Structure formats: C-alpha cells, structure tokens
Image (spheres, rainbow, N blue to C red):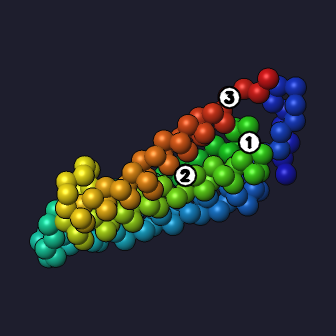
C-alpha cells in the first residue's frame, strides 16, 4: 500500500482497495452490458423489432454506457475522498444501485413502450415513473451529494 502525505496527515492510497476494485468492475461490467444493449437498440431503431418507442432502447444503451463510466469515475476518485472504508462502501452502493437501475428500468420501459417521465394514469408508465424516481433520480441526487462532500478538506 502506497503512503502519501496530504496536509499534515498520512493517507493510504486506495489503489488496492477491494471496494474500489469491485466498483470499477461493476462499472466495466455495466459498460459491457451497455454495449450488448446497443444490439437491442439497433434492432429497434432499424425496425427489425417493433416496439412502441424505439428510441428508449437507445436510451437504455446510453444509460448503461454513461452509468458504467460514472462508476469508474467514482472508483478512480476514491483516493481523493475523505471517507473511511465504511463510507466508501456506502458510496459505492449508493452510486451502483442507481446506475444499474437506470439501465434496467429504461430497458423495461423500451419493451413496454412507455417513458415514465411523468405520471399519466397508464399503469405501465406509472410503474416505470415510480421506479425511475425511487431507484434512479432520488438515489442519484443523494449519492452525488455525498460524492461531492467527500472531496471537502478535513479540518
């Protein structure tokens, strides 16, 4: 484990952290899943498979790619964050669940042909809207706030 001096205290670099490695692996896997989802997007956008809103397959594809990159970015930033292993584990879970959920819920929406961007009274759409809010939007805002908070200077 490499040691560096930050301010007046020593901080171990998180280069060999199992939490960091698992989060980076989850990001790489989500990116790969996004690439596979690109096949679904191509099938819907070319009309090979007919769905209600073909662009949602593209959205699921992009959500997985961007979510994977987000997880990799958070894993990369571990050495700059002022959290204990317990805090880093919570952050990893806090960013991992919404990143994967964003892909999965949007993929389901692409099969159902609903966006879930607002409540419409359509049961399928409203379920997707609820899942997006409960598993993606609110958790992402909270996780991002804690990610940013971790960069603050300790006093």
Q: Residue at (86%, 42%) from the top-left corner?
A: 3
Between 98 and 47, the residue placed more toward the observer is: 98
Considering only order in the chain, which callout, 2 or 3, is on the residue closer to the N terminus? 2
Q: Position of residue 107 (x, y in %)?
A: 32, 66
C-alpha span from label 3 to label 1 = 10 Å
Q: Position of residue 10 (x, y in %)?
A: 87, 36
Q: Which mark is residue 83?
A: 1
Toward the front, the furthest residue is 121
Q: Residue at (75%, 51%) from the top-left corner?
A: 86
In this picture, is 28 found above or below 47?
A: above
CB of mark 2 within 8 Å of CB of mark 1?
no
Does residue 72 appear in this view?
no
Toward the bottom, the furthest residue is 48
Which structural element holds mark 2? helix
138 lies left or right of 24: left
Q: Position of residue 20 (x, y in %)?
A: 68, 55
Q: Residue at (52%, 62%) from the top-left corner?
A: 28
Q: Which mark is residue 95?
A: 2
Which structural element holds mark 1? loop
40 lies left or right of 48: right
């Amino acid at each position: 484990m490499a040691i560096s001096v930050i301010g007046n205290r020593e901080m171990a670099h998180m280069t060999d952290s199992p939490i960091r490695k698992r989060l980076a692996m989850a990001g790489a896997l989500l990116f790969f899943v996004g690439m596979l989802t690109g096949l679904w997007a191509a099938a819907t956008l070319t009309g090979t498979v007919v769905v209600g809103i073909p662009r949602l397959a593209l959205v699921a594809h992009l959500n997985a790619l961007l979510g994977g990159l987000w997880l990799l970015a958070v894993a990369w930033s571990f050495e700059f964050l002022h959290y204990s292993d317990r805090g880093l584990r919570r952050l990893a879970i806090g960013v991992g669940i919404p990143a994967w959920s964003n892909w999965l819920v949007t993929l389901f929406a692409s099969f159902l042909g609903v966006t879930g961007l607002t409540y419409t009274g359509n049961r399928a759409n409203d379920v997707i809207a609820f899942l997006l809010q409960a598993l993606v939007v609110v958790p992402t805002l909270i996780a991002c706030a804690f990610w940013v908070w971790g960069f603050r200077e300790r006093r």
